[in-house]
Amino acid sequence: MERTLAIIKPDAVARGKIGEIIRRFEKAGLRISALKMVHLDKRQAEEFYHVHRARPFFDSLTTFMASGPVAVLVLEGETAISTLRAIMGATDPARASPGTIRRDLGTSIEQNTVHGSDSPESAAFEVPYFFQGPETFDYVRVDRHKGGDGPSS
Ligand code: GDP
């Protein structure tokens, strides 16, 4: 089982898209192990995105990520990292494939609605950045509800 960190970014929270995005996570078969809302301050956003500190958009990105509350989730599945990246789509919504979250809901390369860990190494830093052990939950996901949003329906 893999674990990955997802963030529903301030643009999506402000536009009332939390439910729509979580629906897509669940529909892809990802199990929600943890979720909460936080409002990062600028220093925390810089810490979280430290791998990008040399990039020209670092200041703008971290200001954006601290501009309002975000929803953060731990998602679990056999291939949770690549599954989440696939349903997110490419970084730039204009280049993302039709049907992906960023293509459907993103408004710019920066305000692209979602973050997902890009590797097991990133997930190993990002999950504990937001969640301590007792805040994540193991349970069996049952997908026997007919007509629902589960992958088997
Ligand atoms: P991701 O893994 O697809 O999220 O993309 P990156 O790790 O390359 O970039 C991290 C985040 O920085 C992206 O999700 C965007 O919010 C933002 N970003 C990436 N490229 C650019 C850019 O060229 N300009 C701006 N303003 N933001 C960017």
Image: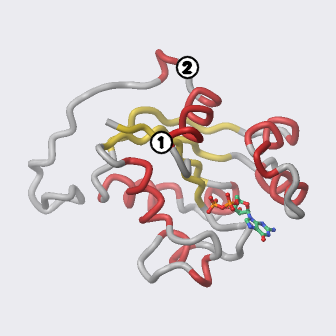
Say the numbered circle drawn on residue 84: none
Q: Earlier in the sequence, mark 1 or mark 2?
A: 1
- Quarter of the picture holding the N terminus: top left
Q: Determine the image quadrant of residue 78.
A: top left
Residue positioned 26% across, 28% down in the render: 139
Q: Nearer the viewer, residue 124 or 143?
A: 124
Kind of residue indicated by mark 1: Thr
Give the crowd class for mark 1: few <14, some 14-19, many >=20 residues within 10 Å: many
In this picture, is 144 found above or below 27? Answer: above
Location of mark 1 (residue): 4
Mark 1 sits near ligand 1, with its Cβ under 8 Å away: no
Splitting the image into four quadrants, where does ligand 1 fall? bottom right
Q: Residue at x 53, y 47 (%)?
A: 119
Q: Position of residue 42 (x, y in %)?
A: 87, 42
- Which residue is tagged 2? 132
Q: Nearer the viewer, residue 149 or 92?
A: 92
Mark 2 neighbour class, 10 Å CA radius: few under 14, some 14 to 19, many 20 or more: few
The answer for how far apart the CA atoms under marks 1 and 2 are is 14 Å
Please give the name of the residue rendered at 59% of the width and 41% of the height, measured from the top-left corner.
122
- Secondary structure under tag 1 reads strand
Amino acid under label 2?
Answer: Gln
Secondary element under disc 2, as helix, strand or loop, is: loop
The percent coordinates of residue 74 (x first, y second) are 47, 38
Left or right of residue 86, residue 109 in this image = right
Q: Residue furthest top?
A: 134
Up-down relation of residue 39 to residue 104 (above or below): above
- Residue found 55% across the figure and 19% down from its top: 132
- Residue 75 is left or right of residue 78, and the answer is right
**Quarter of the view holding residue 121:** top right
- On-image quarter of the C terminus: bottom left
* Residue 73 shown left or right of residue 152 in the figure: right
